[in-house]
Amino acid sequence: MKNILYILIGAVLLLAMPAVAQESDDLFEMSLEDLMQIDIYSVSKKKESLFEAPLSSSTITIEEIRNAGANSIPEALRLVPGVIVREMTNGNYDVHLRGLDNLTRYSDASTAGNQITLVMIDGRPVFNNNTGGIIWESLPVDLIDVERIEVVRGPSAPLYGPNAVSGVVNIITKDIDQEGLAVRANGSAGTDNTQVAGLSLGYKVNDKVDFTVSGNMQMRDRLDTRYYSYADGDYVDQFSDPLASSFFTDNELALDKKGINLFTNYNATEDIKFGLQVGYQNSEAQKPFRRNTFSPMSTQTLESTYANLSMELKNLSGRFSYINGEDNLNSVPTFLPNGTQLTLAYEYENIDTYLEYDFQVNEDFSIRPGISYQRSTYGDDKFTGSSTLGGLNDEVTIRTFSASIRADYAVTDKLRVIGAGRIDRFTSPEEAYFSYQLAATYDINDKNIIRAVYAKSNSGSFMAQNFLNISEAYPVGGGFEGIFLYNGNQNLELFENQLIELGYRSKVKENLELNLEVFYQVTNNSNDIILLPAPAPYVNAASSVGQFNNLNLRAQQWGATVSVNYVPTVKWQIKPYVTVQQTETDDMPVNLSSAQLDPVNNITVTSTEDNDQTPTVFGGLYVNYKPSSKLNINLNSYYMAEQTQTSAYDLANPLNTAGDIESKYIVNAKVDYSIKDNISVFVNGRNLLNNESVEYYAADRNGMMLLGGASLSF
Amino acid sequence: MSNYVFGLKEIRLVTPTFAKDLRTKTMKAQVLLKVWIVALLFGMATTSFAQSNSDQVKTLFVFNFTRYIQWPDKSGEIKIGILCNDADIFKAFQTMAAKKSTASSKITVVQFSNPTEAANYQMVYIPENNSNALAATGDLKNTLIITEKDGLAKKGSCINFITENGKIRFEINKSRVDNSNLKISNQLMGLAILV
């Protein structure tokens, strides 16, 4: 399949060739107004700073995202090298940087999600502190607010904070460029009742003050009607259990999300700036996330309100952010043997704050110390009762105190070294973790840079892993009792990742950038729920008992990413990118039972296994053609090699094929036409080859989707 | 916990197993190297038909400027001096001149390095990497100085190219132009960012 990618890239380049001479001629006939519409990719300051960046990073701009026709933030990440993006149901995605996903293999659905990437909006972390995962539909912003998305691959906690274990996704929102009113609107609608819209109204009073109100919504139906049913051991159109049917009442809904945001900026002087963002979101999404009694699929409803205050006072920068919300991660309860229901609804409140000071010691040396504090409180009392248990059955808090320092030293004109360290002290587990990063760039000349990174980072500390607390005893006859008992573990070692990476960037020509990176990562301290024997006096055969525990398994991943940004003429942009990787897991246990529960097959019986959860090859191609200032044509594609995804269910059902994922090639195209300077209309085709293979464990067959719409900006 | 400073568990930079694993991976690294080389060759191959770029676009801007500006000497010939020894930019200007020159309005492009000679040209283009030369060109009344570095319009160039959101924009220093003998049409002023 690698070959197919290369052939495709070659074919596109060949096609582009004859166009080159002709396009250049057209350029000479352009008016000043036309020239001002041309996109210049190769010389912008941002690109240059990225070119010099010591870490492995990529940026996509909103223009590229719009051109490509991506309809949401996670879908846009398919345009970034090194990112694995699987669509579960229409508009709901599972996103991983380079992989390292589901290392324990038999994890229980939500723990297979990405718990090791730090997602931020303008530097504000937005991950779920309960499960540790990213829930993309919980982001209050959408593409209407986005200026660009930056992705840093590899452990980078010292620079960004805990949980930047496999990397960072930072979503940067738009500023208003000019004084006066700024309006942006974008709406598209298409097959499967898919509607995506955003409206942003901004006003820049003067150089110092501006404010923007924006709203976004997505409504999407599923492209499939089936559910994976545990009782039936297969996908079904109708559950055979009538009780199941009573919970899965809306088999059409895939996503219904809305967000509203207010952004205000006050720039008192050039180096004294304040920003305030407040917003609200609510969402309902049906996707495989947390398994219940009947199916891996269920509906998640999320609602939250946030405020984020940021400031720059000369060299001092800081942030204070606050969020509270209410989630229900599984609309379908899990039933315990005595009929008690287990709900995964909870309320939460998080504070996240930091201060950093930038000492510019001299022209070549700067040092940046910082401190930060995070507090997360989660509780589910509101949702539990005599016949309903929660996951926590309590209100619990984790506080994190951190100190960090970063030094940036230009040793010579050509050699730059960055060293950073960070200590995160958690209240649970009651330990401190040290993460570090050592990176160097060496300019061979102004067109070629080699770089090296050595880094280690740990994950954050999450509620469920620490404080899971489910205990329910029930009679099993003869005066005996069974127990359903699941606990967290406050002594868990946090997941860790160590990386060594070599990179090479070359501006082969002013309009051609080449980026190569080779990486080797080793993980440590994986954890999962380990099944245990029932404590006395409960009957073991009638009980279900487990607790979060560390496993000895270590994953080693090596791989390489190659990406090219080529702008053959002002009208063409071509970006191919591919990652090849291999992950091997040492000490992979045969199952997640303790030796006390199962003396034959248990966590001490291990072997070295290839991890085929992460595709060995993934990547894409972005080709943009803008023949005139009015017309834009884009073709982009995304490829993932085959994978075998596994869940806890497969331990007891080894023949289950819900996680056998075929390789998938997705081709998208969008044509955009400006009917006036500020208004354009477009048609957008997603997955035009109508490849219906499933991309995620027990997920939908997502085939072709066609959309049309309009966008406006002035 | 008392065994540790600040509860810190481990500050080993290279764990022994990490180093061992790395050694066993060298075989795989060789395969990877091959992937690199193929990619590199692929990258090199694509350069052979790279043609226009932002320099070329800027030369077209410059050509368009000539249509909106009146010089006191109305001979019809425009002499553009490139104040820098930059082969790429010079070539881009030559391409533009070859395509856009007509019998009645000829464009000639000359490369020069002594800033005091700037007065010999109707237009002087100072590429970004030679921006320091701006100060040495002096206060010229009949020459339009064009630069391409942030902030130079305020420092005395007439027109300065900047990039905004991936698109080329140009700034005009109005007082500088008003004090010269050049006449710039309001149409061009309307498209510019005035500083």
Image (spheres, coloured by chain):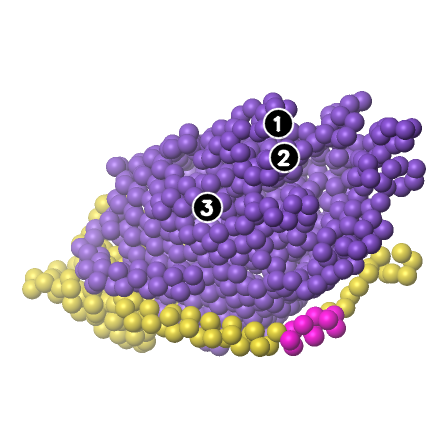
Chain colours: A purple, B yellow
The residue wearing badge 1 is A241
Chain letter of mark 1 equals A
The residue wearing badge 3 is A693
Q: Which is nearer the eye, B107 or A193?
A: A193
Label 3 close to label 2 by CB (< 8 Å): no
Which quadrant is the N terminus of chain A positioned in? bottom left
**Which span of residues is magenta-colored?**
B14-24
* Residue occupying the point 21% across, 69% down: B94
Dot 3 amino acid type: Ser
- Please tell me how crowded label 2 is: few (under 14), some (14-19), or many (20+) other residues with Cα within 10 Å: few
* Residue occupying the point 54% across, 50% down: A660
Dot 1 amino acid type: Asp
Q: Which is nearer the eye, B160 or A579?
A: A579
Mainly helix, strand or loop, the magenta region?
Answer: helix
Chain letter of mark 2 equals A
Would residue A128 be found to the left or right of residue A478 on screen? left
Closer mark to the observer between disc 3 and disc 1:
1
> Quick one: label 3 or label 1, which is nearer the N terminus?
1
Query: What label sits on residue A231 in the rendered view?
Result: 2
* Residue occupying the point 46% across, 65% down: A562
Q: Is residue A512 magenta?
A: no
- Asked if badge 3 and badge 1 are on a common chain, one would say yes
Which quadrant holds residue A546?
top right
Would residue A565 be found to the left or right of residue A85 on screen? left
Residue A212 position, x and y percent, is 49, 34
Q: Which is nearer the eye, A179 or B133?
A: A179
